[in-house]
């Protein structure tokens, strides 16, 4: 996984190559059960045009709208994130491209910049959850947030 230098990056970005086929990565981004398996407890509709929430305990959640969900790109617009209000109005993009037998995932969280108070915490969080996505699609088990 390559992460842009947080001192110079406009938005948080990450590029990784996964062993899983593009259709498996797409499924991990577009079904509530799969998002639950690598990010956190998910409810709602994660397909194109849907809206869903990912919860992180104690009433903390992120509410998202799926702007697009095609084989090449998945785009989530953040509607609300009460525990990280800086996220409201930002956009999360997963660009998917075949890479040999696997998939190159270019991730960018537009609006999540080093100038935000939450950047260090969110940088660490995305680094963990993107590794969890890789573990989920490549090995069958991610490391999502789990409510105790």
Image (cartoon, helix red, strand yellow):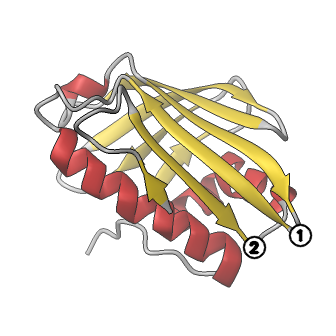
106 left or right of 78 in image: right
Residue at the location (35% across, 66% down)? 145
Count neighbours of disc 2 (C-alpha within 10 A) and say few if under 14, some if 14 to 19, many if 20 or more: some
In the image, taking residue 47 as reference, residue 6 lies left or right, namely left
Query: Hey, which residue is sitting farthest top in the picture?
Result: 89
- Answer with the quarter of the image where residue 46 lies: top right
Q: In the drawing, what numbered circle is on residue 50?
A: none
Report whether 55 appears left or right of 68: left
Q: Residue at x 82, y 34 (%)?
A: 70
Residue located at (69% from left, 77% from top):
138
Q: Earlier in the sequence, mark 2 or mark 1?
A: 2
Closest to the observer, 10 or 27: 10
The total number of labels drawn is 2
Residue 32 in the image: x percent, y percent? 62, 52
Secondary structure at numbered mark 2: loop
x, y percentage for residue 120? 17, 47
Asked whether disc 2 touches disc 1, contact meaning CB atoms under 8 Å apart, the reply is: yes
Asked if 24 appears above or below 62 in the picture, the reply is below
- Residue 48 in picture, x, y percent from top left: 73, 29
Residue position marked by numbered label 2 in the rendering: 19
Separation of disc 2 and disc 1 at Cα?
A: 7 Å
Residue 101: mark: 1
Q: Is residue 43 above or below residue 101?
A: above
SS at circle 1: loop
Residue with the most extreme left position: 117
Q: Position of residue 142 (x, y in %)?
A: 52, 75
Q: Is residue 39 visible?
A: no
Residue 93 seen in the figure: yes
Quadrant containing the C terminus in the rendered view: bottom left
Q: Residues within 10 Å of mark 1 (few under 14, many from 20)?
A: few
Q: Name the residue rendered at 67%, 63% in the picture.
A: 17
């Amino acid at each position: 996984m390559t992460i842009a230098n947080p001192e110079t990056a406009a938005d948080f970005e990450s590029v990784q190559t996964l062993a899983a086929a593009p259709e498996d990565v797409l499924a991990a981004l577009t079904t509530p059960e799969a998002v639950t398996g690598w990010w956190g407890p998910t409810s709602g509709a994660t397909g194109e045009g849907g809206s869903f929430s990912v919860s992180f305990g104690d009433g903390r959640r992120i509410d998202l709208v799926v702007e697009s969900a095609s084989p090449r790109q998945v785009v989530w617009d953040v509607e609300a994130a009460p525990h990280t209000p800086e996220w409201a109005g930002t956009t999360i993009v997963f660009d998917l491209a075949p890479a040999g037998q696997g998939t190159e995932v270019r991730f960018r969280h537009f609006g999540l910049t080093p100038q935000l108070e939450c950047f260090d915490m969110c940088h660490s969080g995305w680094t963990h959850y993107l590794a969890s996505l890789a573990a989920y699609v490549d090995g069958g088990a991610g490391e999502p947030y789990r409510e105790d």
